Amino acid sequence: MIFSALDVIGKEQSILENRKGLKGAGVWERITNSFFCPRNPKHTFAFFVPEYLFIRSVSFCEDISEEMEGKFETKDLAQILYEDFLEHFKKKNDLHEVYKKLTVRDLSPSIIKPYQTEEAYGGVLFEEQRGFQEVKVTLSHQQALKGEFILRDMLDIYSEHQFTLENILEITYSNFIDDYRKGLIKNPIDKVIQYI
């Protein structure tokens, strides 16, 4: 089973196998390999959030931009929220809690295939027809790998789960913005700025 559209665990296995094959290789071959197969590449993930939450998140990002007098976009917010998710998991190490958070707020309907961006109708993604907006975020290889490892470990306990890294991004983002708009987060701008 793969845990994101980019299959980061599979890429990591490929990188490790490739490196094993270089054990007796010459300097030029190693240099060429490190150029074409970097150890810590960046990965761009796309996920979808309901339009009303997306619009609210754009407004929130503009507030942060004003506060810090610099550019701050939805992709920056998504990255910070994902880093916070990983940090929280590192402290608690509770797969049951992660599963519960993901199942409480599963936004993707069952008719959507595991990778939300595969289904297109006349060039318009299914999610866009349903009133969802796309958010893209770039994560380091290690960040993405940690999220996929959490999902892989969760599979040992919840063998039926179908969650992907994109689902983690989507749910943490949507939960934060939804809690923000309901006034459930105290000093949200300060909390986000502390990560910058």
Image (cartoon, rainbow, N blue to C red):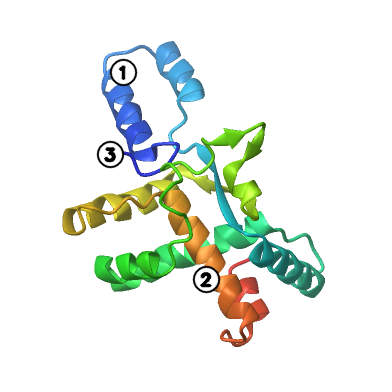
Mark found first going from the N terminus, 1 or 2: 1
- What's the residue at 40%, 51% (across, down)? 110
Q: Amino acid at mark 2?
A: Asn
Q: Is residue 10 above or below residue 62?
A: above
- What's the residue at 27%, 14% (across, down)? 24
Q: Is residue 38 left or right of residue 91?
A: right
- What's the residue at 30%, 72% (across, down)? 97
Q: What residue does disc 2 label?
A: 175
Q: What is the C-alpha distance between the residues marked 3 and 1?
A: 28 Å
Of the pair 65 and 111, the residue shown nearer to us: 111
Q: What is the C-alpha distance between the residues marked 3 and 2?
A: 26 Å
Q: Amino acid at mark 3?
A: Met
Of discs 1 and 2, which sits in the foreground? 2
Q: What numbered label is drawn on residue 1?
A: 3
- What's the residue at 79%, 63% (across, down)? 70
Of discs 3 and 1, which sits in the foreground? 3
Q: What residue does disc 1 label?
A: 22
Whether pointer 3 and pointer 2 mark residues with C-beta atoms closer than 8 Å, the reply is no
Callout 3 secondary element = loop
Mark found first going from the N terminus, 3 or 2: 3
Is residue 171 at least partly visible in the picture? yes
Residue furthest to the left: 156
- Residue 150 position, x and y percent, is 31, 55
Mark found first going from the N terminus, 3 or 1: 3
For residue 30, what is the image quadrant?
A: top left
Q: Is residue 178 left or right of residue 157?
A: right
Q: Is residue 11 left or right of residue 65?
A: left
Q: Is residue 116 left or right of residue 64?
A: left
For residue 20, what is the image quadrant?
A: top left
Q: Quadrant of the C terminus?
A: bottom right
